[in-house]
Amino acid sequence: MKVAVFGTSVSESFIPVLEEFFNYLKTKKINVQLFKPFHNYLTANLKIEPYYSSFFSSPDDFDKSNNFIFSVGGDGTFLHSVVNIRNFEIPVVGVNSGRLGFLADISQDQINDALNNIFNSNYSIIERSLLEVEFCGGEKIDFSFALNELAVLKTDSSSMININAWCDKQLLNNYWADGLIVATPTGSTAYSLSVGGPILTPDSENFVITPLAPHNLTIRPVVVPDKYEIELKVGGRGSHFLTSLDYRAIPVEFSTTLKIRKANATLKTLQLPDQDFYNTLRNKLMWGFDKRN
């Protein structure tokens, strides 16, 4: 059995969980390929020496024969793992050292039970859709995929931007707003949710289009089939707007048209027993924490 372990940083309070995690892998004699920058952080900042068999530093030296990828951190780290590993065939498992964690959903008190279930094949695979962005008339970017969302945003000026949006070659709307989010079902519980967008189940075959501070009170989020290509043309003062692919912000010239479509690949994640999507929603959003229940 071979696994990869990815991370960026964790707090000192997470050290006991890390030790339990790596000791489990060592006891079971699991072959561990560890992300080298994470190893450097753990040894230099937390003064611990994690168990490992080899290192990787980029997609180029990542071992494609790994059975799982463990992302240790929060949802932000999970998104970093997608970009730094770029392998859509190996399931990603999120170990949560953060706060909310819809993607990194293995909590600190579940480590041992979760690992037992994983290595005893007691899980199911959830395939999460990705979106892909084409920058027409602008510079090409490296790895133009997103697991959560694409967002177009105004720059640091106070002026709104104007976003013309087409769905399946039909005009949807001309938005005057601070920005616009196009989210996958996975991303529906991220940025889009925080600005009033709806929650979609991971197997929903849709995109959510959610405006940011629209200058029209009748504007609402829209759910469209993910078989549609969404085209955005942005205008405003100055020369640039910002495009965000998950956590990566990229300045883009107003002359550039964005075309967003569902990617051909999906990202595989694990669903452990008693961790179905609705259970995760209840726990993370504290649904049911009502004295009437």
Image (cartoon, grey):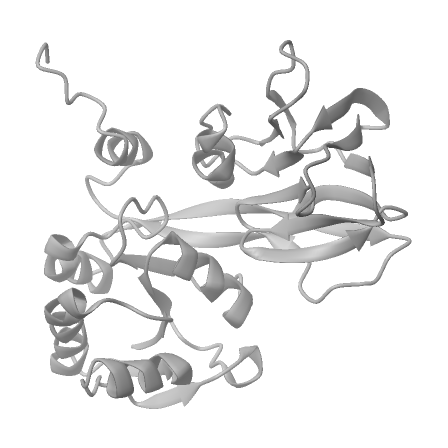
Residue 45 image point, x, y percent: 26, 82
Horizontally, residue 194 falls left or right of residue 16, namely: right
Residue 97 image point, x, y percent: 24, 58
| Picture residue at 22% right of the left edge, 29% below the top | 286
Above or below 249: residue 28: below
Horizontally, residue 127 falls left or right of residue 282, namely: right
Q: Is residue 247 visible?
A: yes
Picture quarter containing residue 76? Answer: bottom left
Name the residue furthest front. Answer: 158
Closer to the camera in the image, 152 or 133:
152
Residue 19 image point, x, y percent: 13, 75
Horizontally, residue 178 falls left or right of residue 268, namely: right
Above or below 180: residue 198: above
Closer to the camera in the image, 239 or 93:
239
Residue 263 image point, x, y percent: 66, 49
Above or below 267: residue 62: below
Q: Quadrant of the N terminus?
A: bottom left
Horizontally, residue 136 falls left or right of residue 208, namely: right
Above or below 236: residue 245: below
| Picture residue at 57% right of the left edge, 31% below the top | 205
| Picture residue at 24% right of the left edge, 32% below the top | 279
Q: Is residue 89 visible?
A: no
| Picture residue at 34% right of the left edge, 86% below the top | 40
